[in-house]
C-alpha cells in the first residue's frame, strides 16, 4: 500500500474524491465513471473512515486521512454527497456532516409519507425535496464549508486507486484498495 500526500495540508469541511481503477489490458489507471462502481469505491472509503466496515480493510488509509483532516480527528464521521452530473463524490467530514443530515430530513420525511400513502417513494413531493436538498448541499459546499487546500492555497482533491476484482466468469465483483493521495486541482 502506498499513500502519498501533499506536504502538510490540513483542513476542515469537505474534499472532492475521484476514483481510479487499473485497466487489466494495459495496467494503467483510468477514471471510474459508472455510478454503481463509484458507489462501491466510495463505500470502501466511507465504511473504513466511519468504522462501520465488517472487517477493517486498510487501517493505513484511515490513519493517513486522520492526519490531514482536523474535523475528522475531533469527530470521526464522514458523509458522501454524490454529484450525478460528474464522477466526483464530495466527502464532508466532522461536524459539517450534521448540516448535511439536517438538510436531508425533508427528503426522508417526503419519502416516508409517499410510502405510507402510495407504497412507493417516487412522488413529485419526494423528488422535489431531493432536488431542493441537492441545491442546498451544493450551496453549503460552495459557501459555508471549507475545502481542503494545499499549503500554497490551491484546492486539493483526494484520488483513491483500486484494482478491480473479477469473478471466474470475468464479471466485476468489487475493488481492492491500492493507494490514496491528495493532488492539486488543475
Image (cartoon, rainbow, N blue to C red):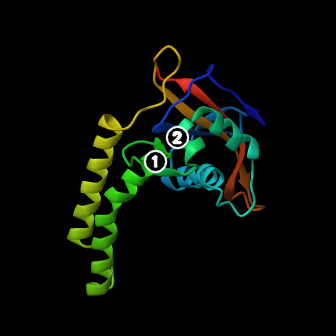
- Which residue occupies the extreme top position in the image? 152
Q: Is residue 183 left or right of residue 27?
A: left
Residue 137 visible to an observer of this rendering:
yes
Query: Based on the displayed image, in which of its 4 quarters is residue 105 positioned?
Result: bottom left
Mark-to-mark CA distance, 2 and 1 = 7 Å
- Which residue occupies the extreme front position in the image? 74
Q: Nearer the viewer, residue 53 or 26?
A: 53
Query: Based on the displayed image, in which of its 4 quarters is residue 129 positioned?
Result: bottom left
The residue tagged 1 is: 95
In the image, residue 2 sits, relative to residue 137, either above or below, namely above
Packing grade of label 2 (10 A; few <14, some 14-19, many >=20) is many
Identity of the residue drawn at 52% across and 40% down: 71
In the image, residue 84 sits, relative to residue 141, either above or below, namely below
Q: State the quadrant of the N terminus.
A: top right
Q: Are marks 2 and 1 in contact (CB under 8 Å)?
A: yes
Image coordinates of residue 155 in percent, x first then y, are 46, 24
Residue 24 visible to an observer of this rendering:
no
Q: Nearer the viewer, residue 147 or 76?
A: 76
Mark 2 vs mark 1: which is more N-terminal? 2
The residue tagged 2 is: 71
Identity of the residue drawn at 26% across and 68% down: 126
Q: Nearer the viewer, residue 158 or 148?
A: 148
Q: Secondary structure at mark 1?
A: loop
Packing grade of label 1 (10 A; few <14, some 14-19, many >=20) is some
Q: Secondary structure at mark 2?
A: helix
Amino acid at each position: 500500500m502506498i499513500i502519498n500526500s501533499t506536504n502538510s495540508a490540513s483542513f476542515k469541511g469537505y474534499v472532492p474524491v475521484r476514483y481510479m481503477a487499473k485497466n487489466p489490458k494495459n495496467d494503467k489507471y483510468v477514471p471510474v465513471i459508472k455510478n454503481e462502481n463509484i458507489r462501491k469505491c466510495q463505500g470502501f472509503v466511507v465504511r473504513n473512515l466511519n468504522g462501520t466496515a465488517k472487517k477493517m480493510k486498510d487501517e493505513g488509509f484511515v490513519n493517513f486521512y486522520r492526519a490531514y483532516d482536523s474535523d475528522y480527528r475531533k469527530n470521526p464521521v464522514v458523509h458522501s454527497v454524490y454529484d450525478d452530473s460528474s464522477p466526483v463524490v464530495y466527502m464532508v467530514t466532522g461536524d459539517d456532516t450534521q448540516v448535511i443530515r439536517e438538510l436531508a430530513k425533508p427528503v426522508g420525511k417526503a419519502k416516508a409519507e409517499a410510502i405510507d400513502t402510495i407504497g412507493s417513494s417516487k412522488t413529485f413531493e419526494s423528488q422535489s425535496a431531493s432536488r431542493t436538498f441537492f441545491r442546498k448541499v451544493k450551496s453549503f459546499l460552495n459557501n459555508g464549508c471549507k475545502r481542503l487546500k494545499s499549503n500554497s492555497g490551491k484546492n486539493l482533491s483526494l484520488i483513491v486507486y483500486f484494482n478491480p476484482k473479477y469473478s471466474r466468469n470475468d464479471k466485476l465483483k468489487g475493488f481492492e484498495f491500492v493507494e490514496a493521495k491528495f493532488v492539486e486541482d488543475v
